[in-house]
Amino acid sequence: MMKLKTSRRTFLKTSVAGIAVLAIGLNSKGAWASSSPGGTLNPFVKITSDGKVIAVIKHFEMGQGTTTGLASLIAEELNMSLDQIEYEFAPADIEKYKNLGFGAQLTGGSSSMRNSYSQYRNAGAAAREVLIQAASQQWKIPANKITLTNGVVTAAGKKTKVSELVATALTIEVPKQPTLKDSKQFSIIGKSNIRRRDSEIKTNGMAQYSIDVHLDNQIVAVIKRAPQFGGLVQSFDAGKASLVKGFIKAELLPNKKGVVVFAQNTWSALQARNAVNIQWDLSKAEHRSSVDLKKELLDAVNTNAEHQVSKNSLSITNQSLQKAKQVVEATFYLPKLAHAPMEPLNCTIEPTRGGGVRLHDGCQGVTSAHHTLAAILKLPLDKVEITTLFSGGSFGRRVSPENDYHQEAAMAFALTDRTRPVQLIWSREDDIKGDYYRPAFAHKARVGLDSNGKIIGWDHRIAGQSIFKGTPFEKHLVHGGVDHASVEGVSDSLYNIPNLYVGLTDAKPATRVLWWRAVGHTHTAYVMESMMDMAAKAAGKDPVAFRLEHLSQGKDQQRLAGVIKLAALKAGWNKKTTTNHAKGFACHKSFQTYVAHVVEVEKKSNGSFQLKKITSAVDCGLAVNPDMVKAQIEGGTLYGIGHVMRNEITLNKGSVVQSNFPNYKPLRISDVGTFETHIVSSQENPTGVGEPGVPPAGPAFANAIAALDKRATELPMEAAGFKFNS
């Protein structure tokens, strides 16, 4: 059995024998219902007769705050404090807990709050109404005379706890359209004094991450993988590994992509892996180096594009550029990037009674993991359980089209006698060298300006490796040969750009690639916002004013204009900076959220740069938990700046050079100055905040440096000769 500390009671199942449970959710027909006999139910809130109120969280927690955000919606509608709400992660069940945007049980795309806001509010409201009706039935008092506050139902001198109404509530029909609270009545939603629900256990070390799983009789598996992308095992010798204390055995993976080493503990497994000698077949492996790949991309953006993305043809754009008073032109290169979460990949598979298995994982893609284990272990889906735990970050890494680490774990488990739990562990070096990277991209843009400094034409070429081609997502996200993730943020820019031409060339695959925090926006925003600054300078106009001139009066554009104005106001944009100080500006819309940054930097006497202050504005609709919105914008902004400063993944004859944080450097505390985040007041539906802070962060930083020095068109800045005071 798994060893659990008492503080993790919130993760235990509550439907134990002898305890009645009122579960509120959607039935198979999509109508609100309770757990009364008859039909299956998708519960979002459970109330037990022993006093627990539990929010069932369908989006996993990787630090972005789902356990607090979704529980807040339940608490608000139940008129309870957030501290009175426990939470547990939903089991694997695509029909009950699918992400409405993806059609699978999946967390991603900054969609958790956007996807679940109405569901969880309605569940809380339905529970409230059923409990009040139960009290009305017991007391013979009209429901409109009864109130529910802090878990206590009161009316006409009577009061009772909600737990004492569960049995009666189970007999009452749930309203099809429960009445939601008016926003003026909110005591939790939109309030900045709400404490994160998981802060205490994460602070005191009691939180259980998937890497913390330690089951009775558990063994550890680590894998020695090919040094080059595409390499396969030709033969191996584990003779020296057998001398390591704790070593159990080494086996060839069925797909020949590596050798799995089993041992009694992690240290023994890693030491034994080092001792395994493998002969690799590298005949079909990648042999190019980063200098070769970079040249291929830069050559591609200087020739005719493979795909026309825009409605406008290149000939029309060229005509407009020929009429321009001046043309601003630049070529950019943005390297491969690793996800590098603090917790490397890992998961544990344990056998269950009846020949089934249970996966313990910080599981981002529950549906894909569920099907992967079932297919490899040749089990029906109902024999595969998933226990979701906390994850120490992801940035997109914990779910991939191939479900790579779940595949590895399932193959490793299948290579045992299936009687012992098997924990798959990736080391930090495995994670950096074997990631699915943010692909490298090259851009070339030419912007034409008329005599009034307005844009009249824009030619934009992009080249890079497609994320979605060749994956199960291709039919949904690739149209006319164009992977939208390669061009998003350019082809759908909110700026009013006449005669925009966008061309795309797909690069030959060099490594595995994947969505990375904010996906295509991570490179397109850098180029777009750098070019807007360069165009503003050429036009002799203020960068903020220039951007506002190129936004129409449409709702979408004016929401972007709103954050532009707010960030500029709060940062004192028009105030002169002191000597060797400069401010840079950038803004962007991604994942239906609008973000603007003003970054102030100082150039030191030794030529290095110090980030002094960041001022951000965000319009994410209704901010359910403002403090967490600020935390996500801050985290995303610093994540974006850190990678622009120093990070890149490079190849040497097909092998990844970087291996750990000494040569893939995370942002340091000493790199960062003060930070202000301002949230636009809004009653629009909530949108995402986990990713939108990233795209404009890098270009705002680069634009500030360009005001004092040369412009960074090749990243990372440090490799291009920029120095930072840290």
Image (cartoon, helix red, strand yellow):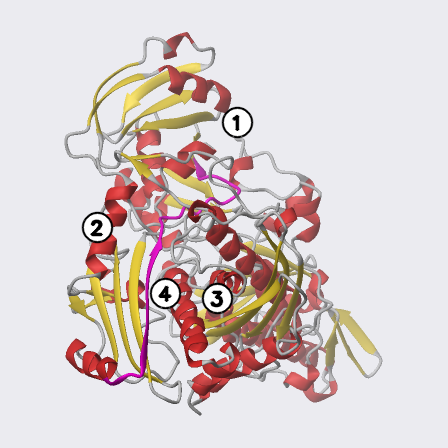
Q: Secondary structure at mark 2?
A: helix
Distance from disc 1 to disc 4, alpha carbons, whole Å, reads: 49 Å
Earlier residue among tags 4 and 2: 2
3D distance between C-alphas at marks 3 and 1: 48 Å
Location of the N terminus (image quadrant) = top right
Task: Find residue 337 and report its horizontal and vertical position in percent.
Answer: 39, 48
- Report the residue at 41% width, 60% height from top: 522
Viewer-side label of 1, 2: 2
The residue nearer to you, when weighing 17 against 87, is 87
> Residue 268 bears which disc, if any?
none
Amino acid at circle 2: Glu
**Residue 624 drawn above or below residue 645:** below
Q: Which residue is mark 3?
A: 696
Query: Is 24 or 157 nearer to us in this picture?
Result: 24
Q: Residue at x 21, y 35 (%)?
A: 287
In the shown orientation, is residue 417 left or right of residue 285? right
What residue is disc 2 on?
296
In the rendered image of this protein, does residue 364 appear above or below residue 545?
Answer: above
Residue with the mark numbered 1: 216
Structural crowding at the residue carrying mark 4, measured as other residues with C-alpha within 10 Å and reported as few (<14), some (14–19) or many (≥20) = many
Comparing 667 with 185, the one in front is: 667
Considering only order in the chain, which callout, 4 or 3, is on the residue closer to the N terminus? 4
- Which residues lie in the magenta part? 323-348
Does the residue at mark 2 contact the one at mark 3 (Cβ under 8 Å)? no
Position of the C terminus, as image quadrant, is top right
Q: CA distance from mark 1 to mark 2?
A: 52 Å
Name the amino acid type tagged 4. Answer: Thr
Is 445 left or right of 453, judged from the image as shown?
left
- Does residue 463 show up magenta in the picture? no
Q: Which residue ends up furthest to the right in the rendered image? A: 157
Type of amino acid at the residue the image marks with label 1: Asp
- The residue that label 4 is drawn on is 524
